[in-house]
Image (spheres, rainbow, N blue to C red):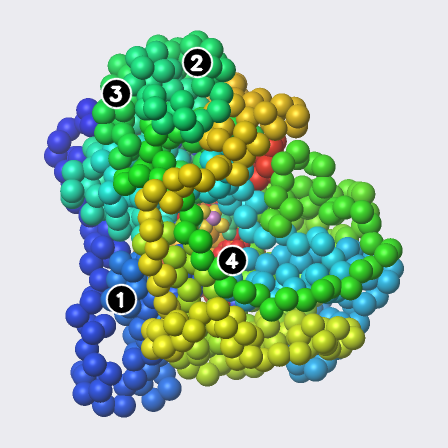
Amino acid sequence: MSSANEKGLTRRQFLQFSGMAAAATLGAPRILHALIPSTGNQFGSDVRSLPSICDMCLNKCGLIARVEKGVVRKLDPHPQFLKSRGMLCAKGNAGIKQLYDPDRLKYPLLRKGARGEGRWQRLSWPQALDLAAEKFQVIGEKYTRCGVLFMAGSDVQSSFVNRFASVFGSYNVVSHESNCLVSRNRAYLDTFGEMPIPDTLNSKYIIMAGANVFEALITPDSIDMMTAKQKGCKLVVLDPRFTKTAAMAHEWHAIKPGTDMAFFLAVANVLIEEKRYDEKFVNEKTYGLEQLKDHARKYTPEWAEKECEIPAKDIRRIARELAAAAPAAMIYPGRRTSDYENSTQIRRSMAIVNALLGNWDRPGGLTAAREIKVKAKPFDPPFYEENPEERIESGRSPMMFEEEGSFKHARDAIIEGKPYPIKGLFTYKINPMATGANRRKTIEMINKLDFMVTVDIAMSDTAWMADLVLPAPSYLERMDPITALQGSSACGCIVTRDPVVPALFESKPVFWIVSELAKRLGLGKYFDFTMEEYRQEQLQDWPEAKKDLKKDGFHFKHSKIYGVYEGKIYKTLSKKIELYNQRYTEKKADPMPVYKPPQAVPEGKFRLVVGRNAYITQGSSTNNALLAELVPENELWLHPKPARNLAVASGEVVEVASPVGKGILKVRVTDEIRPDTVYMDSGFGVLSKGLSNVYGKGASIVEILEDHNDTISGNMAMHETFVTVRKIT
Ligand SMILES: Nc1nc2c(c(=O)[nH]1)N[C@H]1C(S)=C(S)[C@@H](COP(=O)(O)OP(=O)(O)OC[C@H]3O[C@@H](n4cnc5c(=O)[nH]c(N)nc54)[C@H](O)[C@@H]3O)O[C@H]1N2
Ligand SMILES: Nc1nc2c(c(=O)[nH]1)N[C@H]1C(S)=C(S)[C@@H](COP(=O)(O)OP(=O)(O)OC[C@H]3O[C@@H](n4cnc5c(=O)[nH]c(N)nc54)[C@H](O)[C@@H]3O)O[C@H]1N2
Ligand code: SF4
Ligand SMILES: [Mo]
């Protein structure tokens, strides 16, 4: 497999251009447009410009909604919102179709026929709430209150679901994070004592492995990466696919999936053997250099080449270039190489190289998280004596995060009924039917339940399986609490939302839903406040922010970026950056990453990998009418060589099958992927007929993916599935 930089210039230039076109949607905000005053513009004088915060993905970019006679006509980027550098991406623009989607849920629905049959009865809100409260009460009495599992996705109101779970008495709360990035968080926390923020903007050399920032947008990193490149930063991408990020990179290496650790251990080897690491920094601030020296000795670039299929001379050169650019150089922490059974250790190898570069707390490297906190209204939850000792999935992986849980493990535990039964499920703004690998198991789990409630804006596949479906307003119709946005090199900020238009249909925010449930369950005193009162209390520590929040929906807290760790200790056992982690030994994990090759791809099969494009959010925006125009269905990326063997051409149809499921979709024959790997977009092959734009299109990746997990953190490992591909005639 050759690297992109060895390919013909014309093709590369072409792809760079197509990458640039995609990036232009994110890089060229229509600032001038957004700055037009709210009266007397081309929309007419009764057009108002109202600020809000985009919610089409987790990034939360600032926007301005143009509202004409109570109707949102257009969404523009907020030019002063630093975190997104005044950008609103394609998905952000398409938010208008999320609001005005004819498929929106309109009123509470109760399942009539069998699960997944799609027969519903309309209920009034009082009927729906009475029913849900009664069902949860009964489950609580019969199976203890931990017999109800709560799942809330990435949302500013999810904290109210957690609060409700806590006062109801269940500590079985699972977020989306164990399907996302907990293994990365684990690795960085256990190395640096915290999750660092990359100073992408000022970096001179970035290796991006298992991340795709020009399609999987992270603000401000995606935009800053573009600016950094213009300022001369070198970008090296390791990805089995030629992504848009790879197209924009100086170098792309089609790394063999699952072998990044070999690459990074070899980089560590070169840095140590050639004494190119930051000696002063490493001696002063890290723990375990001597052990690492011994450990890394055997991991030479020549050894690594055989594992990761990147030439030894390139590994050596890249290590030297990195060292020369350090400390303004980094292995981009990314979000999810969380895809293998040893993902925490893969990420540890990257974190360790970062530490060797001494790129901590200095321009162009990794920086400390900005301290930014907003109070939540304090409460003292009741104690329920009869509850079990532990969370349902406790002990299934040694170092799970208590606050996030593990979807994979919790689902297994519910199916097994062990160590105790869970019979109720409440989901809010999360779609595990489309985002949890092995969909059949999710269905199996749901079939074990007595009662399931889903709060969503659309009839997602998860809602489709529920007993009771409750309609929520979109972000443009909500009043939200104040939330701190961490994790951005544009400094910390707090954001909030006021409705730009009134809530449509009978939709109700989850804050109201859980407050009403609490009242019915005798827990009303824990929700005896309005959203306005809640915000007032949150703002007690933020008097200076009031004006900004009202005007823009955000307030930035400018703070020191570099040198904040001077004189501070690291939040690790050794109080230093841990190249060697003693705690891991106690947990029977390797204290330093030990390379174990991934399972070889069996003859005649392919490894299926997950990824993103700029027009889809995880598993759930594919029904959006504007985005569906851009990606109407998914296709299987297949390299020309195996395509020839299978006698299949682009546009023809194949069956992709794994031991757990299969799907039928069109093929895209392309050399933008390794011959041993296949890829397809997420969010297609839906079961719900309530998603009328996407129903019947493409195949579901979670139907095909097996559910492995990162052994240490319990993160779903989504790249451990081998599939067969067969032409359908
Ligand atoms: N447009 C868009 N933007 C998003 C999101 C979205 O859904 N859509 N979601 C947001 C969220 S929640 C997240 S977590 C982030 C995710 O952002 P990223 O972490 O950038 O995630 P992915 O797009 O999944 O990129 C992972 C890449 O790893 C590659 N890969 C697979 N196996 C290997 C391997 O073994 N080694 C290496 N080096 N590469 C491998 C895949 O081909 C893929 O391109 O994006 C955020 N931004
Ligand atoms: N197949 C596949 N699986 C994945 C990923 C992938 O790329 N592909 N990515 C992984 C990652 S990184 C992550 S972070 C997780 C994310 O996992 P999920 O959190 O399950 O992600 P989404 O697909 O965004 O699901 C969001 C749900 O909320 C609903 N929704 C949207 N807006 C609102 C609202 O305002 N109110 C309410 N009540 N509901 C709303 C949507 O209709 C949808 O049902 O998925 C992980 N799993
Ligand atoms: S990256 Fe795009 S979809 Fe995500 S919040 Fe920003 S504008 Fe919205
Ligand atoms: Mo994620």
The residue at which mark 2 appears reads as 293
- What amino acid type is highlighted by mark number 3? Arg
Q: Name the residue under label 1.
A: 80
Upstream in sequence: badge 2 or badge 4: 4
Image point 27% across, 41% down: which residue? 363
| In front of the other: 638 or 204 | 204
**Camera sees residue 675:** no
Report the Cα–Cα distance between label 4 and label 1. 24 Å
Q: Nearer the viewer, mark 3 or mark 2?
A: 2
Q: Nearer the viewer, mark 3 or mark 4?
A: 3
| Residue 565 makes an appearance in the image | yes
Q: Distance between the residues labelled 1 and 2?
A: 47 Å
Q: Earlier in the sequence, mark 4 or mark 1?
A: 1
Give the quarter of the figure containing the C terminus: top left
Q: Looking at the image, is mark 3 or mark 4 earlier in the sequence?
A: 4
Q: What element carries label 4?
A: loop
Tell me: is circle 4 under 8 Å from ligand 2: yes
Please give left or right for residue 290 compared with residue 78 in the image: right
Disc 1 versus disc 3: distance between alpha carbons? Answer: 39 Å
- What is the three-letter code of the residue carrying label 4? Ser
Question: What residue would you read off at disc 3?
Answer: 320
Please identify the quadrant where the N terminus is shown.
Answer: top left
Mark 2 vs mark 4: give the one in front: 2
Label 4: which residue? 154
Decide: few, some or many residues near mark 3? Use Cα within 10 Å; few <14, some 14-19, many ≥20: some
Disc 3 to disc 4, how far (Cα)?
A: 39 Å
Q: Label 4 neighbourhood size at 10 Å, few (<14), some (14-19), many (20+)?
A: some
Work out whether residue 449 or residue 642 is closer to the camera in this orientation and state it: 449
Left or right of 40 on screen, residue 183: right
Provide the secondary structure element on which disc 1 rests. loop
Q: Distance between the residues labelled 2 and 4?
A: 40 Å
